[in-house]
Image (cartoon, rainbow, N blue to C red):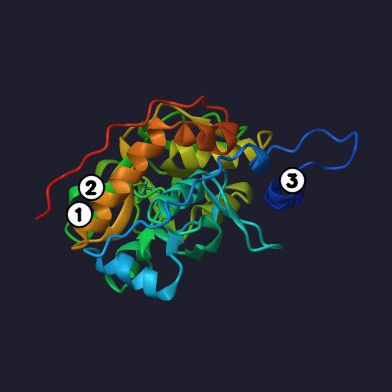
Amino acid sequence: MMRTRRALAALALVLVAAVTAVTACGKEGSPPVKGPQTDKLPQYTVNTGFRLTDSPTWNKAERRGHLVVGVKEDQPYLGEKDPASGLYTGFDIEIAKMIGASLGFDPKTIRFRTIASANRETALQNGQIDYYVGTYTINDNRKKLVGFAGPYYMAGQSLLVRADEQDIKGPQDLAGKRVCSAAGSTPYQRIQSDYPNAELVAYDTYSVCVDNLLTYQVDAVTTDDAILAGYAAKVPDELKVVGKPFSEEPYGVGVPRSDNALRFAIDDALEANEKNGNWKKAYEATLGLSGVPAPQPPPIDRYPAS
Ligand code: GLU
C-alpha cells in the first residue's frame, strides 16, 4: 500500500514536471520549475535560398513545404512532448531544429513524429521521416540499414535504481535482478550478451520501464546516462543513477542510407552550430538542467559513401 502510494505520488510528479516544463514560471513565490528554459534557447537563422537537389529526401521535403523529423517524446531534457500543447522540447529537438534551419526550413514548421527505438530503421527506410534525432547510437550494424550524420553527443550506458537500493552498484550486480530496457536498443543488447544472468525485461519505451521501477515490478532500468539522469532529476527522492557508464554511445542523426548528400549537409550543419555557439547554448538550456555541464562535442565522423 505504502509502496503504491509513494509510487503514484512519484508518477504524478513526473507528469506535473512534464507539463510545467513547457509553461515554465509557476505561481508567484513558488520555487522555480526545473524544465527547458524556452527564453534561453538559441534562435536559429533560416538558411533561405539553400538548395540540396542531390538529396531525394530534401527534394521531397521541399515539395511538401516542411520537414518531418522522428524523435522521442518521453525522455526528459532530450525529447519530451507536452501532453497539453503537443509541443516537443529538449536537446534532441534543438538539434533537429538547428539542422532544419541550416537546410532552409523554418524550425517552427517541423512536424515531429514520435518513433520508438525498435522502429527507427524502418521509419527511415520507408520514408516516414526525413531524419531522426533521438538518442540514436551510431554503430556498424545500424549503418548497414541507415546513414548517420554526427556524432553530436557522447553518452554511455548506465543504471537507474530506486533511491533506497543498496545491492546494485554496477552491471556486475545484476545477476538474478529484473532489469528493464527498450526493445531494439543497444543497452538491451549489451545486457543480453554481456550480463546473461540478469532477468531482462523489454518495453517500447524507457518511461514504461521507469514506471515499472517505481512500482517494484523491476529492480533497475538500463540505458544511456543522459536519459537516466533526466528521469532521476525529476524525482530525486525516489530514483538514483548508480556506477560509472559502461559503454560509449555516440549519438547520430539518422538519415536514409543512400542519401549521402543529406548526411553530409547535416554534418555541415552540426559543425557550423558547434562553432557558432548554438550547440552549447541549446545544451545548457535543456540537457544541462539534469546537472552535467556542457562537454566538448565529439568530432564529426564524415565517413565515405558506400
Ligand atoms: N542510445 C541507445 C540506442 O540507440 C539507447 C537509447 C535509445 O534507445 O534511444 O539504442
Instruction: State the residue at coordinates (43%, 61%).
Output: 70
- Residue 143 is marked as 1
Earlier residue among tags 1 and 3: 3
In the picture shown, does residue 258 fall above or below 273?
A: below
Give neighbour class at mark 1: few <14, some 14-19, many 20+ (Cα, 10 Å). few
The total of numbered circles placed on residues is 3
Q: Position of residue 208 (x, y in %)?
A: 55, 57
Q: Position of residue 186 (x, y in %)?
A: 32, 49
Depth check, front residue: 78 or 87: 87
Earlier residue among tags 2 and 3: 3
Instruction: State the residue at coordinates (53%, 63%).
Output: 109
Instruction: State the residue at coordinates (38%, 26%).
Output: 296
Residue 202 image-quadrant placement: bottom left
Residue 27 image-quadrant placement: top right
Disc 2 and disc 3: Cα gap in Å? 39 Å
In the picture shown, does residue 202 fall above or below 42?
A: below
In the picture shown, does residue 287 fall above or below 259?
A: above
Which residue is the extreme one toward the left? 306
The residue type indicated by label 2 comes to: Asn
- What residue does disc 2 label? 139
Disc 1 and disc 3: Cα gap in Å? 43 Å
Of discs 2 and 3, which sits in the foreground? 2
Depth check, front residue: 53 or 38: 53
Tell me the SS state at disc 3: helix
Q: Are marks 1 and 3 in contact (CB under 8 Å)?
A: no
Depth check, front residue: 260 or 191: 260
- What residue does disc 3 label? 6
Of discs 1 and 3, which sits in the foreground? 1
